[in-house]
Image (tube, rainbow, N blue to C red):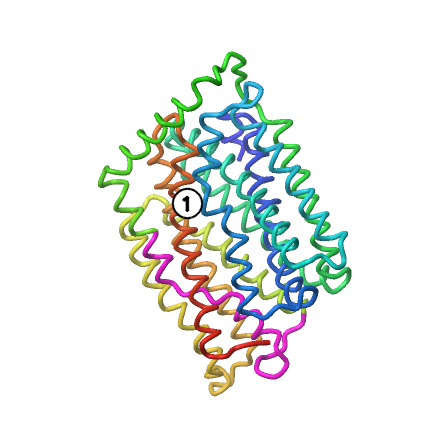
Amino acid sequence: MRMLCDEMHWSFVFGVIVIYGVSQGLGGAVSRVASDYYWKDVQMVQPSEAQVYQGITSIPWLVKPLWGLLTDVLPVAGYRRRPYFIFAGLLGVVSMLTLSLHNKLHVAFALLAMTAGSASVAIADVTIDACVAQNSINHPPLAADMQSLCGFSSSIGGLLGFSISGLLVHAIGSQGVLGLLSIPSALVFTVGILKKEMHAPNFVYKEVCQKFLQANRTMLTTLKCPDVWRPCVYMYTSFALSLNIQEGMFYWYTDPKAGPAFSQGTVGFIFSIGSVGSLLGVILYQHVLKDHPFRGLLFWSQLLSSFSGMLDLILVLRLNLKIGMPDYFFVVIDEGVSQMIGRLKWMPLLVLSSKLCPPGIEGTFFALLMSIDNFGTHIVMGWWPTTSYVEGHSR
């Protein structure tokens, strides 16, 4: 971290820690548990509906290239990055307080507020990713170290968030916890105030359309390169073919009849073990695997990911009970192993993506690459509600 502070400004490292560690890591972990209980207990929706709503709230992540394009070609008050951090922070504070302070909020307005909160995190994510990609181009030997800092911050934040999320939901309810999520958004606002950035006061706004078109041409030209589109195809298919039943598993975890009826604290602890697995994946990549070829890393991580996906099936079929392993211990092992493998699979893709970004449109192109993954995941999230409806699964 000191090396990164020496090579870049301390405000960059501070921004990475706040965005990845506090906003996405801690805030994302707490939000995951709190929003699940919010849809289940406050809005009282079916699990298939909750999965659809989660898909809708992820739409701001699908349009990440739009946020990236804005940060690259449309500076505000002479700054390319700082205003977007400030806007993201304000949007997050307003949306989280809205969910917290209204006890009988209509489901449509709740969904709108959740989507706005998701957009807040997505905009901040795109903006800090643009900073990381730009610094990766300027300092290629430090690209892996920067991604490791991002992953380490996210994992530590997630570990802390999941460790306290269940206790917080039990103590103050899901709405109270959502209100606390305005604090990470306020810190994102602080990043926008403190971030060191070159001021360019003479920007000609009449050239915005021309710059948009130029950025699109550069992006399309880059995508035609085989070294770029081949990893894109892999990233999409890898996520699109991985079935995501997160919401269904949550309802099953907490079902007193069909499932093991885990408490709020237990659910938070299970997710915190997943963050430990993710952290181990970051450490393993940074100290052992970062100098290995991308092809070998992706092959083995994809293979292991396929095997880890079978653990959910074993759990639901209760095969673990036949070998004498309680649900609690099996779920803990499942979450830890799955998250570690997922992080090992994700880290080389992040490093590769940051190196593929052409200068001048770092935010746009990195966001495009990441939205490919999000789109694949979004497609998968639509499978479970459909199959759940066909099979008659409900609360």
The residues colored magenta run 236-263
Tell me: 214 left or right of 68: left
Tell me: 227 left or right of 288: left
Q: Is residue 239 magenta?
A: yes
Along the line of sight, which residue is nearer the eye, 288 or 238? 238
Check disc 1 and report its element: helix, strand or loop: helix
The image shows residue 143, relative to residue 251, as above or below, that is: above
In the rendering, at what x and y percent does residue 33 appear?
Answer: 62, 61
The C terminus: image quadrant: bottom right
In the rendering, at what x and y percent does residue 2 appear?
Answer: 54, 32
Along the line of sight, which residue is nearer the eye, 301 or 237? 237
The image shows residue 40, relative to residue 151, as above or below, that is: below
**Is the residue marked by circle 1 packed among few (<14), some (14-19), or many (20+) residues within 10 Å?**
many
Which residue occupies 58% across, 45% down? 21
In the rendering, at what x and y percent does residue 274 appear?
Answer: 53, 61
Tell me: 154 left or right of 243: right
Q: How many marks?
A: 1
> Which residue has dot 1 on it?
370
